[in-house]
Amino acid sequence: MYGVIMAGGSGTRFWPRSRSDRAKQFLSLYGKHSLIQSTLLRFSHLVPWDRIYIVSNRAQKKMVTEHCLNVPRDNLLFEPLSKNTAVCIGLAAVHILENDPDAVLAVSPSDHLVLDKKKFKDTITAAAHFAEESRSLVTIGILPSRPATGYGYIQTGEEIAYRSSVQVFRVKTFAEKPNLATAEMFLKSGDFLWNSGIFVFRADVYLAALEEHLPDTHDGLRKIQAAIGSVRYEDVLQRVYRQIRGVSVDYGVMEHARSVLTVRGNFLWNDLGSWEQVYLLGKKDKDGNSAHGNAVFVNSRNAYVYSSKGVVGIVGLEDVVVIQDGGAVLVCKREEAENVKLLVEKMKRANMEKYL
């Protein structure tokens, strides 16, 4: 098995801590390690360091190198352009296949929170068993704890017995992020899981699925594979990425593949998609306030503060997020936290890149 960590995201919902030169995966949002370092440590319990690959983009090369010191330099792959996850995974697959035609890939985002390493290891090991035995594409589903509208869902079909501690199902269908009423219906039905964005499959099986469902992507990746180790590699990589279509692995492959399984993960998982998620996970005082750095709360409830230096005072406010970092301040309602990305887009249009 090989670990493939997708680390090319920007994390605009975490402005102002997340910037163009410091994306979400390089932040410490929970615990002392950055998110990408926590992901690497989790995978180091599954595979040796020399079987972990990172796929990021060239703009983040310096940060990736600094945060991934235990990963061999040859295993750090940098895309010239962002083309979404189907291509990102494919690039890792063709590199790994050059050395191991029987490779099984455990693919994960770099910026999610996973607690309980043992349950995570058991889940991925079970997924790898089925990916190898049945040559299926396997995704990890998380038992939902609430009717979340920010996650995609997986509808489970027939259950396949494997171990008492791990449940495996055939996938009936994938569902996009629902509205609240639909999410409540999913939760009540009992046969929907959150789509974690973690996948396990043989590298050759994945490329075969690309050939069937995204043939142009497959052909481009094979051209890149043919150039690996040669002086032509960078030129071929650049040319293919300019021409190739960007599409997610969920939409481009998983939703159309004929043999897809899901393993139910019982570990605590959170995609840390906004400051609201950080607040929910943080320690709170008797009034429900949570802070990282120096903060003083007066007549305030259920607020979250991050302060990189100095002190932040909150008076008479409820359900707010206040982030002070690097000469910029964010103030928003907690329920609006996901819309921070809209703020970043507006600042880009206003030519305020120096703050981004």
Image (tube, helix red, strand yellow):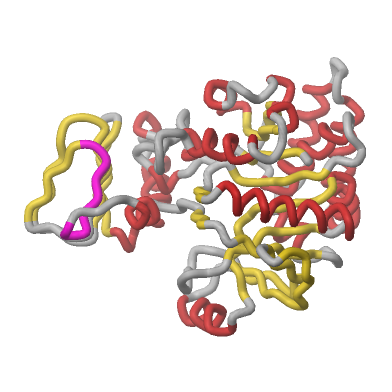
Where is residue 310, by image quadrant? Answer: top left
Residue 165's place in the image compared with 89, above or below, is below
x%, y% of residue 149? 48, 69
Q: Nearer the viewer, residue 287 or 162?
A: 162
Residue range highlighted in magenta: 286-293
Q: Nearer the viewer, residue 127 or 223?
A: 127
Q: How many marks?
A: 0
Q: Is residue 106 left or right of residue 299?
A: right
Q: Is residue 198 left or right of residue 218?
A: left
Residue 178's place in the image compared with 84, above or below, is below
* Identity of the residue furthest to the top in this view: 231
Q: Nearer the viewer, residue 272 or 43?
A: 43
Look at 83% across and 63% down and name the residue there. Answer: 257
Look at 53% across and 43% down and name the residue there. Answer: 111
Reply yes or no: does residue 292 show up in magenta. yes
Q: Is residue 173 left or right of residue 188?
A: right
Quarter in which the C terminus is drawn: top left
Look at 53% across and 50% down and name the residue there. Answer: 116
Quarter in which the N terminus is drawn: top right
Residue 224's place in the image compared with 286, above or below, is above
x%, y% of residue 62? 55, 21
